[in-house]
Amino acid sequence: MELVKPAFGLLFWMCISFGIILFILKKFAWTPILNMLNEREVSIQKALDSAENARIAIRELQDNNERILQEARAERDLLLKDAREIREKMISDAKNIANKEGERLLKSARENIQNEKSAAITELKNQVATLSIEIAEKILKSELSSDEKQKTLVNTLLQDVNLN
């Protein structure tokens, strides 16, 4: 039973040994261990702060990326709108130019037709005049083939002149 109930001397030396070990551990082990634990705690806190800062930075980057994407989409939409407007303006201008050119060609064709018509009428009049002169010449030759017919014609013409 002595093991269950230790003697006073054993307890005394156990307390002294425990005190000495405690002093030695405090002097040489606990301070470095506590310093290491503090350093570890500080490094863990720094890592947590760094992770939080990184998370905030990532959130800011995501927000910035989203804003840039929205700006890019808005700029793309604006460019597409401008391109559509330019295309429609070019089509409208081309139609206007084509209409003006068509009107000019139509006017030119009408003028050409009118000129050709006038030339044809003039040519026809000239041919009619030439034919009329030839016919009159043939008639006069046949009418005035004799002297008597010539005198009768002259008298008739003189009477017509006197009447007018």
Image: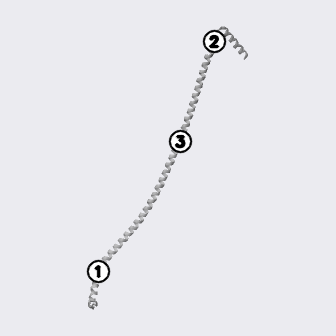
Bin the neighbour count of mark 1 within 10 Å (Cα to Cα): few under 14, some 14-19, many 20 and up. Answer: some
Residue furthest to the front in view is: 1
Residue furthest to the top in view is: 147
> Picture coordinates of residue 25 (x, y %)?
29, 80
**Tag nearer the camera, 2 or 3:** 2
Amino acid type for the residue under numbered disc 2:
Ser
1 or 3: tag closer to the N-terminus: 1
Disc ID at residue 25: 1
2 or 1: tag closer to the N-terminus: 1
Q: Which residue is labeled 2 in the image?
A: 142
The image quarter containing residue 105 is: top right
Amino acid type for the residue under numbered disc 3:
Lys
Q: Is residue 6 above or below residue 141?
A: below
Tell me which residue sits at (73%, 16%) in the image.
Answer: 163
Amino acid type for the residue under numbered disc 1:
Leu
The image quarter containing residue 134 is: top right
**Tag nearer the camera, 1 or 3:** 3
Tell me which residue sits at (41%, 66%) in the image.
Answer: 55
Q: Which residue is labeled 3 in the image?
A: 95
> SS for tag 2?
helix
> Picture coordinates of residue 73 (x, y %)?
47, 55
Distance between mark 2 and mark 1 Cα atoms: 167 Å
The one of 107 and 30 positioned closer to us in this rendering: 107
**Tag nearer the camera, 2 or 1:** 2
Tell me which residue sits at (47%, 56%) in the image.
Answer: 71
Q: Is residue 134 above or below residue 38?
A: above
Q: Is residue 112 above or below residue 75?
A: above
> Picture coordinates of residue 149 (x, y %)?
67, 10
Answer with left or right where residue 60 lies relative to residue 93: left
Cβ atoms at labels 1 and 3 below 8 Å apart: no
Answer with left or right where residue 31 lies relative to residue 65: left
Bin the neighbour count of mark 3 within 10 Å (Cα to Cα): few under 14, some 14-19, many 20 and up. Answer: few
